[in-house]
């Protein structure tokens, strides 16, 4: 690890051997229990983070609720200025933070840098947004009256994040929440806790330089039990939770029970439809990057290829051929395409999924398995696999968070392919490869893809921050990042003002005294 400059990166980010896991900004609290963060890259212990106790959680919530009262009074463009400075700090620290992401989570260094770039991009977006939190005026049916809609700050936003985007998901939420006047409490994934400490160090420095109070950016650490402190807490009006559908089902219900809002970003089961006119030059890199990038651990990873029978053999052979070029190895080495899975549990889930697919009748085209030998001592490196399967297989209907690609055929019209693409419980990302305008438009129409993201002639993964990100059905329905996703971080208020001398009632109701 030393050769890739990890030690220097940890130092630049203020990561120590044992790090307090609870913070309200520049103040840190440590409990006795710790989480050890082992790198899936080489199996080594990177550092420890202390788990948030109930008492420390209370301190965080007191600090956050107090900070909200003052933070919401700062004009939105001035809050935008804080986010601008935060974006600049991220620019300065892109290299060490990208390296930590790569080393703690296991994604390629380029993807680690890409993740930090996404944080920078959302900061830029949020800075502009800070002058555009616009409401509207609405014509009133009553003379001498005016109606308006205003957007007000919401309060403490709870953020629960998954291991696979250990820094970007936090920034997608916080950059918007902060310009909206909210304060944030973040529980990072227990599988990548050091990333949360690094991010908190970065924002804490910005807040200090601006003499801002504690409580605007808070972190807590631990497993689901710490997450539950937030889901059941009525002081948190919005919980934004990214992770598995299993988690979202519990979190969504708990938050709804107390009438809180939840923004759920859950699992996907993303497909690319490959039609007879698809351009192989686009299909092959799109499908292969989608399936093996981040070792298949993106919520938008390509899981299924739905290929027209007339081009099936040609596409299959091209994809299988491309898999022969994939280099598996240390993700910090830029020559490698595929790094490790997050941990050995993930490896077991991957192996089980391959067995299940075989048992259901799947035909293995590219054999999977664990990679062994020098450089692979962590036991987390696996071979990207390709399996010919059918859409109705139980295993195909579920998201396996690993590089397993299922190939399936469709015949006849594109409607048949769209039915297959929609024929799963998840609804995150989807794509069609075609040069037929009518097919592309059908895919994007009301009768087309039922996903939150639908692409033409690009793959399923790699969204830009400018669009709203999220999906339907078991993906949870939440939208984050661009477009008008900011509205979920605010409360809407409808105002009617009477500037006449009369009091006419709406709907012409008479009430004479
Ligand atoms: P996970 O569900 O195991 O954990 C996610 C987070 O939820 C963790 O911080 C965990 O501690 C917390 N958590 C779990 N149970 C909880 C509970 N009952 N109450 C409160 N918090 C709880 O997911 P993971 O393995 O870290 O991530 C992989 C999953 O995330 C995949 O399914 C992937 O598709 C999904 N994901 C979705 C998106 C998206 O934007 N749609 C983005 C990234 C990842």
Image (cartoon, rainbow, N blue to C red):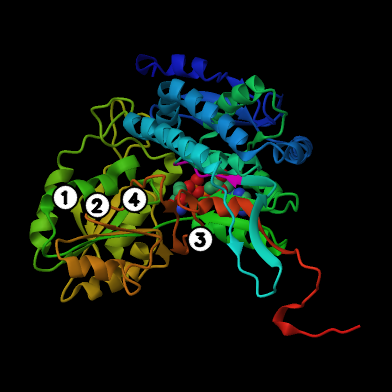
Q: Which mark is residue 477?
A: none
Marks 3 and 1, Cα distance to the nearest angstrom?
30 Å
Q: Which residue is mark 2?
A: 458
Of labels 1 and 2, earlier in sequence is 1
Marks 1 and 2, Cα distance to the nearest angstrom?
7 Å
Q: Which residue is mark 3?
A: 476
Per the rendered image, the range of residues in magenta is 159-164
Q: Where in the figure is residue 476, as x and y percent of width and height?
A: 51, 61
Of labels 4 and 1, earlier in sequence is 1
Residue visible at 25% across and 49% down in the picture? 385
Of labels 4 and 3, earlier in sequence is 4
In the picture as drawn, the residue positioned furthest to the right comes out as 513
Is the distance from the Cβ of mark 3 to the nearest ligand 1 atom less than 8 Å? Answer: yes
Of labels 3 and 2, earlier in sequence is 2
Q: Where in the figure is residue 112, as x and y percent of width and height?
A: 38, 32
Where is residue 450, by image quadrant?
A: bottom left
Marks 2 and 4, Cα distance to the nearest angstrom?
13 Å
Q: Main secondary structure of the magenta part?
A: loop
Residue 79 vs 435, above or below: the answer is: above
Q: Where in the figure is residue 209, as x and y percent of width and height?
A: 63, 20
> Mark 2 Cα within 10 Å, few/some/many (few <14, many 20+)?
some
Callout in the foreground (4, 3):
3
Pointer 2 with pointer 4, Cβ within 8 A:
no
């Amino acid at each position: 690890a030393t050769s890739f400059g990890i030690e220097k990166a940890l130092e630049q980010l203020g990561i120590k051997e044992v790090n307090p896991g609870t913070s309200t900004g520049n103040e840190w609290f440590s409990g006795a229990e710790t989480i050890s963060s082992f790198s899936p890259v080489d199996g080594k212990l990177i550092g420890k983070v202390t788990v948030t106790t109930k008492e420390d959680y209370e301190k965080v919530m007191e600090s956050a609720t107090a900070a909200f009262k003052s933070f919401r009074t700062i004009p939105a463009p001035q809050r935008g200025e804080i986010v601008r400075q935060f974006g600049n700090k991220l620019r300065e620290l892109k290299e060490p933070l990208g390296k930590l992401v790569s080393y703690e989570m296991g994604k390629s260094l380029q993807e680690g840098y890409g993740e930090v770039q996404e944080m920078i991009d959302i900061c830029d977006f949020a800075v502009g947004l800070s002058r555009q939190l616009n409401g509207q005026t609405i014509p009133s049916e009553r003379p001498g009256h005016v109606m308006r809609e205003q957007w007000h700050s919401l309060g403490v936003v709870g953020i629960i994040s998954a291991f696979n985007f250990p820094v970007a998901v936090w920034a997608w939420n916080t950059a918007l929440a902060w310009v909206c006047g909210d304060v944030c409490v973040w529980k990072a994934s227990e599988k990548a806790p050091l990333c949360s400490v690094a991010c908190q160090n970065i924002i804490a420095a910005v807040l200090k330089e601006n003499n801002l109070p504690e409580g605007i950016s808070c972190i807590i650490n631990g497993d689901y039990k710490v997450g539950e402190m937030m889901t059941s807490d009525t002081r948190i009006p919005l919980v934004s939770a990214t992770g598995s559908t299993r988690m979202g089902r519990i979190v969504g219900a708990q938050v709804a029970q107390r009438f809180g809002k939840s923004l759920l970003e859950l699992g996907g089961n993303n497909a690319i439809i490959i039609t007879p006119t698809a351009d192989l030059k686009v299909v092959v890199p799109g499908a292969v990057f989608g399936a093996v990038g981040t070792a298949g651990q993106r919520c938008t990873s390509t899981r299924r290829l739905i290929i027209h029978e007339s081009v099936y053999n040609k596409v299959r052979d091209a994809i299988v051929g491309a898999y022969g070029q994939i280099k598996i190895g240390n993700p910090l080495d830029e020559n490698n395409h595929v790094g490790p899975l997050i941990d050995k549990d993930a490896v077991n889930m991957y192996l089980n999924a391959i067995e299940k697919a075989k048992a259901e009748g799947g035909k293995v085209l590219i054999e999977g398995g664990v990679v062994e030998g020098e450089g692979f001592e962590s036991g987390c490196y696996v071979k990207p696999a390709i399996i010919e399967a059918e859409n109705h297989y139980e295993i195909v209907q579920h998201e396996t968070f690993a590089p397993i690609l299922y190939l399936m055929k469709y015949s006849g019209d594109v409607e048949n392919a769209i039915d297959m693409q929609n024929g799963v419980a998840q609804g995150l990302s989807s794509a069609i490869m075609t040069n037929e305008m009518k097919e592309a438009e059908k895919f994007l129409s009301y009768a087309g893809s039922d996903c939150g993201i639908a692409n033409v002639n690009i793959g399923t993964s790699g969204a830009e921050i400018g669009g709203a990100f999220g999906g339907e059905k078991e993906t949870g329905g939440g939208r984050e990042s661009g477009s008008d996703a900011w509205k979920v971080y605010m409360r809407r208020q409808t105002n009617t003002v009477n500037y006449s001398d009369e009091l006419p009632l709406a709907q012409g109701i008479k009430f004479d005294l």
